[in-house]
Image (cartoon, grey):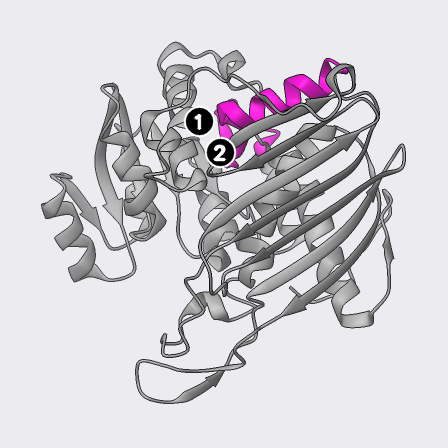
Amino acid sequence: MVNIGIIGTGVGIRTYLNTFKKLENANVIAISGSNKERTEEFAKENNIPIACKDYKKLIDLKNLDLVCITAPNKYHYEYAKYCIKANKNMILEKPATMAIQEAKELKQIIDKSDKINIINHQLRFNPYLLKVKEIIEQGLLGRVYYINIHQQSTGFSNKDMKWIWSLEENEGGGVRLAMGSHLIDLIRFWLNKDILTVKGNMDVVIPKRIDSNGNVKAVTACSFFDANLNFKDNITVNASATCSAIGKSEFNFQIYGENGELHFDLENKLIGYFIDKKGTRQEIKVDGVTTEERENKVSIFSGSFIYCAKPLLSSIENSNSILLENVSKIEDAIENQIILEAIKESNMTGKTIEINSGYKSNVNC
């Protein structure tokens, strides 16, 4: 059994705890949150023995094998830093940090650690998305020249929704960090190539909200972003996301190569077109997909966590990090953050941002 502590009662409950309940070797023994009463209530409802008001008390528990940091984005750096120094295995919710320098500082500490320290980009473990990487690397598409990827949800389209922390740029970073971090990481995982330029746009969509006290507050974090990315070998990528959609939740992409195409959406799943049978639609068989995901009973994001959780727990049990070869590490977080900050800088300046090893962000994230 792997003894687990979860910091955060939002994503920590909806995704992490609900997934761990399905795994026989997962034993959630502690949870912490900012609201003492709510944390104790969650602990009681879910038979979690320990409820901690302070994240340090949870991390310091001696019999804890894994710490899951799912607190609001602005706390990630602080909590992760303490966890790494406490010599605990850690999975850190995305984005790893709010700024490049914070991620670099975490890397310096992680480099001295012999524990597992990973970022929860669970899409890397999704069977459909792993199949895409396999097809690209096998050369079945030939030279890839264009990728379009889009995600949308309807959560923020309700104009009566109250103001929350994720609508503040310096606390949550909006959909740019919430969903953009996933999309950027996935693209980098697929291509494994250097990025050259970034052109980005962002929009808050609904500029003002009423908070819980009845006060009008400005929304400073974007509810929509779009980024045009140019990678080495002349690969163009367009990535976009909105949490203010009016229609339905979607996750789709199209990948174009000289010898083939891949298309994905939640209804049809993975479809291919190849030059030897031009114009013929081919359903691509993918093994290892859960029934919940095949039937769209969970989102691709929360549903993908089980594919990541299984090898993570096995790696801890067997002290074998090879099981996590596809995982997103702090080095990836740094590269992702460079692109995410360039999107913001491009939106602010209207310029295309050139990326290189000496890139320094000119925005205050």
Classify mark 2: helix, strand or loop.
Answer: helix
Q: Amino acid at mark 2?
A: Gln
Q: Is residue 306 above or below residue 321?
A: below
Q: Is residue 171 left or right of residue 102?
A: left
Q: Is residue 157 above or below residue 11?
A: below
Comparing 331 with 346, the one in front is 346
* Residue lying at the far bottom of the rendered structure: 215
Does 127 appear in magenta?
yes
Magenta highlight range: 110-139
The residue located at (55%, 48%) in the rendering is 95
Q: Amino acid at mark 1?
A: Cys
Classify mark 1: helix, strand or loop.
Answer: helix
Question: How many residues crowd mark 1 within 10 Å: few (<14), some (14–19), many (20+)?
Answer: many
The residue indicated by pointer 1 is: 308
The residue located at (57%, 55%) in the rendering is 177
Q: Is the residue under label 2 in contact with that under label 1 (CB below 8 Å)?
A: yes
Q: Tell me which corner region of the image, top left, top right, bottom left or bottom right, holds residue 232.
A: top right
Q: Is residue 4 left or right of residue 158?
A: left
The residue indicated by pointer 2 is: 122
The residue located at (45%, 69%) in the rendering is 157
The residue located at (43%, 32%) in the rendering is 304
Q: Is residue 215 above or below residue 320?
A: below
Residue 287 in sight from this viewpoint: yes
Comparing 251 with 97, the one in front is 251
